[in-house]
Amino acid sequence: MLLVATHALLDPNFAATVVLILDVDDTGALGVVLNRPSGLPVAEVLEPWRDVVAEPEVLFQGGPVGIEGALAVALLRASTPSPVGFREVTGQLGLVDLDTPVELLEGSVAEMRIFAGYAGWGADQLDAEIEEGSWYVVSAQADDIFREDPSDLWRDVLRRQPGDLAWHSTRPVDPDLN
């Protein structure tokens, strides 16, 4: 699932973001922001993974929590069994342990993106934010996660939604200025 920030969400960490939810349980939720590429090449911080990551080959800002660490989200090639160092999230999508030698994943990964930090919510915190109107909850598509240019991701995800939700993709940040 994706969380798409509404205009009501004023926190600068999440304004106009699209968050891929990776894990939800009784203690909370964890995800990564998909549309915040940094200018830092992966090769400068995690050199062994430079040939594995999808374009653009930069570190993405996954969220405000744990920014000193990194999470790798990967899509396995079709019909590939889970290799060592891969933890399934759903289907062929999962997390890669960056301490795993790259050679053990060679040929298994179709696409991968590395995120510095993550977005996290405590128990019931995300539910409260959704209820107050801070997030739209929508289905994810594989091309949302690994698109080369994520600058229009927020609008594109909203635009494909049914009904009134698609209308929000054209809404200005401040409707009073319209």
Image (cartoon, rainbow, N blue to C red):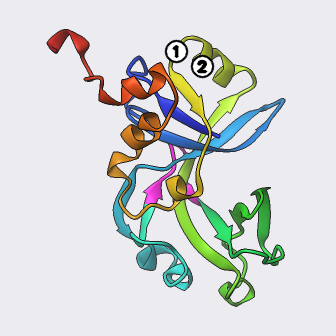
- Residue at horizontal 64 percent and vertical 15 percent from the top: 128
Which one is nearer the viewer's eye here, 39 or 109?
109
Which residue corresponds to mark 1? 133
Q: Is residue 82 visible?
A: yes
Instruction: Residue type at mark 1: give it.
Output: Gly
Which residues lie in the magenta part?
Answer: 60-70
Instruction: Residue type at mark 2: give it.
Output: Ile
Task: Name, please, the residue furthest toward the left.
Answer: 177
Per the image, label 2 sits on a secondary structure element best described as helix
State if disc 1 and disc 2 touch (CB < 8 Å): yes
Which one is nearer the viewer's eye here, 128 or 149?
149
The percent coordinates of residue 99 (x first, y second) are 70, 75
The percent coordinates of residue 72 (x first, y second) are 61, 64
Q: Is residue 67 visible?
A: no
**Residue 160 painted magenta:** no
Q: From the viewer's perspective, tell me whether residue 60 is left or right of residue 73.
A: left
